[in-house]
Image (cartoon, helix red, strand yellow):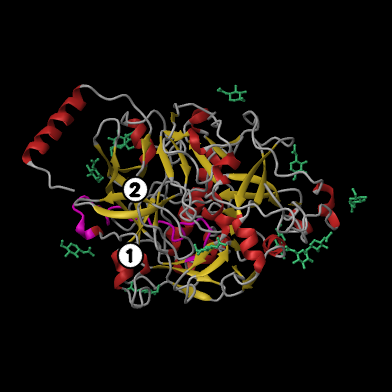
Amino acid sequence: MAEPTPFSITLLLLFNALYAIFPVAATPFGMTWSTKSFGPDGPWQAVRVSIGSPGQTIALYPGGSFRSHLLTSKICSNATLSPGVCFASSGGIYTPSNSSTSFDTIIRFPATTDYTHGGLEVQGSAAIGALDQISIGFSTKSQREVIVPNVTLAIHDDVNLVYPGGSTPVLELGTLGLGFLGTVNQSFQQTNAPNINGSLIPGYLQAQGITNSNSFGLHIGSVEPRISASLYFGGYDQGRIVGAVTTQQGAIAGIEGQDAGAVGLIDLLDIELNVVEGASPWNSTNVASLLGSGNSSIGPALSVVMLPEAPYLDLPQSTCDAIASWLPVTYQSSLGLYTWNVKDPQYERIVSSPSVLTFVFRKDQINTANVTINVPFMLLNLTLEAPLTSTPTPYFPCNAQSYGRYSLGRAFLQAAFIGTNWNANDNQGVWWLAQAPGPNIGSQSNVQDIQDQDVNISSSANSWSTSWEDSWTPLSIVSGNATTSLPGSTNSTSNGSNIRAIGGGLSVGSKAGIGVGVAIGALVALALGVWLFAYRRNPLRKPATSRGFTTSGDVSHLNNAHCLSTDSPGFLPSETHRSGGYGPAELMDNAMKPVHELSSD
Ligand SMILES: *[C@@H]1O[C@H](CO)[C@@H](O)[C@H](O)[C@H]1NC(C)=O
Ligand SMILES: *[C@@H]1O[C@H](CO)[C@@H](O)[C@H](O)[C@H]1NC(C)=O
Ligand SMILES: *[C@@H]1O[C@H](CO)[C@@H](O)[C@H](O)[C@H]1NC(C)=O
Ligand SMILES: *[C@@H]1O[C@H](CO)[C@@H](O)[C@H](O)[C@H]1NC(C)=O
Ligand SMILES: *[C@@H]1O[C@H](CO)[C@@H](O)[C@H](O)[C@H]1NC(C)=O
Ligand SMILES: *[C@@H]1O[C@H](CO)[C@@H](O)[C@H](O)[C@H]1NC(C)=O
Ligand SMILES: *[C@@H]1O[C@H](CO)[C@@H](O)[C@H](O)[C@H]1NC(C)=O
Ligand SMILES: *[C@@H]1O[C@H](CO)[C@@H](O)[C@H](O)[C@H]1NC(C)=O
Ligand SMILES: *[C@@H]1O[C@H](CO)[C@@H](O)[C@H](O)[C@H]1NC(C)=O
Ligand SMILES: *[C@@H]1O[C@H](CO)[C@@H](O)[C@H](O)[C@H]1NC(C)=O
Ligand SMILES: *[C@@H]1O[C@H](CO)[C@@H](O)[C@H](O)[C@H]1NC(C)=O
Ligand SMILES: *[C@@H]1O[C@H](CO)[C@@H](O)[C@H](O)[C@H]1NC(C)=O
């Protein structure tokens, strides 16, 4: 790009001045996506933002509520975390000291280490609360750069992942926080000083009149085959919805840190194999009841959460094994994942044909309606790379080591649209899940506005199967082994029917969702737990033990103040929170004295 000339700067200033006089009508704000893709378990797409001043260009996975999580250059200078190569720098890395707008010591309230909400097992020191401005790109309508000041951040100096075979430094990207119920500012309280306020991006955009609502619509798309990604604040691209929309009550996802998986849940009723067209690579065109197969404790539904900040399908081992039994894959116990047996002829047949993994969800929290999302196996032919494997290895992303925290990450969200209106129902929130299209989506987006209290969004008239037609190759009937009967319990659903019909009207569940109260309660518990582990940024602090901040499977410890008394600084921090969903607040202990104590549980 050419250097700005004085003339163009003058024009820009003039434009900005005019803008101030004649504000442009609020309209959805579309994020820019990085032209690179990321691993080591992808490839995945990520949004591109510019953080701080001068701007540091960094790619982030959109995901998670409240703070955005950034990996810092300290990871690259740590030889343990970056042995020869700094994987964390692949999307650009944040150096707070190089930004004149950064406040990296002002918020001494520590943030969670695991910013994947249990989608991965993350360990390391607690992240540090910080503020910095983020340029989220240009508004196409006003032609102005939109810079959100003082975005609440959590900065990670020391973080790595634990797999069953050991720990490994493979976190490549941080996350761009997607907001929270009714929240513009996340407030951190200090003694004898005004609150420190940090912005959440979608709330800020609405408060500034740039968008009409505190909301977003997201389809992360896919790299291979190429499905461009889409993220709008204050609206959504209707072309990204090609099936019935389920409207869920409450917040879409967990709040930062541990919420015991109680927020943003949707009932997953079943997982099936289906063949949309042509012959089946299996001995049936429909194999159902895989979710509960061989595990009676699962019952009629498994509650899961959507995690764009995490990569895998995090399901019970029994479910992963049941699906895997139909696939030419090998379980890799050191990773908890399955690698495709690429020499098996079934691999090519499954991955290149209209064969799909179908997820059946309860629709609108009503027990008589389902919504299905089909994930073509073509999207589940992902690649493990260094340092997880020495050579690029195709894998099937079912994570059989999810420690009881079940979620659907990017592997699933390649094929699904999700969105939220955080302010709907008087800040109780609604969120949406729907089938997203395949590669053939047309070059024009059809961006729709979301208004402040909207609870409904609309599907496009596009056909899902048409969006995939050019990308997959149906197996010819003569060469296939398509029979229709299956053994055991799957018999009842193998009635020869093809893929479930996608389509139908919208309706809003009448059941009230998870309210703010629950969220805030969990937040306080989280805050206390995290605080007790790492009460302030102190070089003399005891180094974290390998399990110290490991979160998956360790939730109860984090939430239990008593078992941590030896690590306690001798007082408990006091946190306050506001009604209306404002984030965690902190009393800064300048005098190193508690202002008042929490009644301990
Ligand atoms: C480097 O990373 C290791 C492993 O996470 C950690 O224990 C150590 O404290 C880090 N060193 C520094 C100087 O941050
Ligand atoms: C910080 O800025 C300085 C001066 O521009 C530059 O030399 C250095 O590489 C930057 N540090 C990082 C880690 O980006
Ligand atoms: C901080 O944010 C809260 C909540 O949005 C607001 O009530 C308060 O006025 C803000 N404080 C300052 C100093 O702007
Ligand atoms: C950002 O936060 C700092 C610390 O609270 C404050 O001094 C500054 O005025 C804020 N900047 C803006 C643009 O609100
Ligand atoms: C958020 O905080 C900023 C100061 O950082 C303040 O100017 C603004 O009024 C607050 N917004 C709301 C909606 O409370
Ligand atoms: C069976 O499902 C339950 C969850 O309902 C899970 O805790 C357990 O690990 C599963 N068993 C196996 C062998 O996967
Ligand atoms: C699976 O993915 C790899 C890596 O993108 C690709 O090279 C291969 O062709 C894919 N396999 C099939 C059968 O599509
Ligand atoms: C919803 O899905 C479940 C599990 O596949 C099935 O038993 C039920 O009949 C379906 N209900 C409707 C209304 O489609
Ligand atoms: C059909 O099934 C038979 C027996 O299972 C198998 O030998 C044959 O390879 C299959 N045909 C195809 C085209 O997969
Ligand atoms: C279909 O394949 C499954 C798994 O290979 C096998 O258990 C089952 O017996 C087969 N059913 C028929 C009717 O061939
Ligand atoms: C399987 O389907 C056949 C034909 O519809 C039926 O006769 C049989 O009873 C079914 N078996 C089970 C276990 O449902
Ligand atoms: C949302 O959609 C449902 C189902 O179509 C309808 O009953 C309801 O009235 C709509 N709500 C609003 C506020 O438009």
Question: Mostly what secondary structure, the magenta segment?
Answer: loop
Circle nearer the N terminus (2, 1): 1
Residue 438 shows in the view: yes
**Left or right, 292 with reference to 220:** right
Q: Which mark is residue 152?
A: 2
Nearest the viewer among 560 and 226 is 226
* Location of residue 551 with respect to 509 vertically, above or below: below
Q: Amino acid at mark 1?
A: Ser
Task: Give the position of the C terminus as an image quadrant.
Answer: bottom right
Q: Amino acid at mark 2?
A: Thr
Q: Residue at x 31, y 60 (%)?
A: 92
Q: Position of residue 126 (x, y in %)?
A: 40, 62
Nearest the viewer among 170 and 127 is 170
* Secondary structure found at label 1: helix
Cβ of disc 1 within 8 Å of ligand 2? no
- The magenta region covers 97-122
Crowdedness of circle 2 by 10 Å Cα count: few (<14), some, many (20+)? many
For label 1, the residue is 89
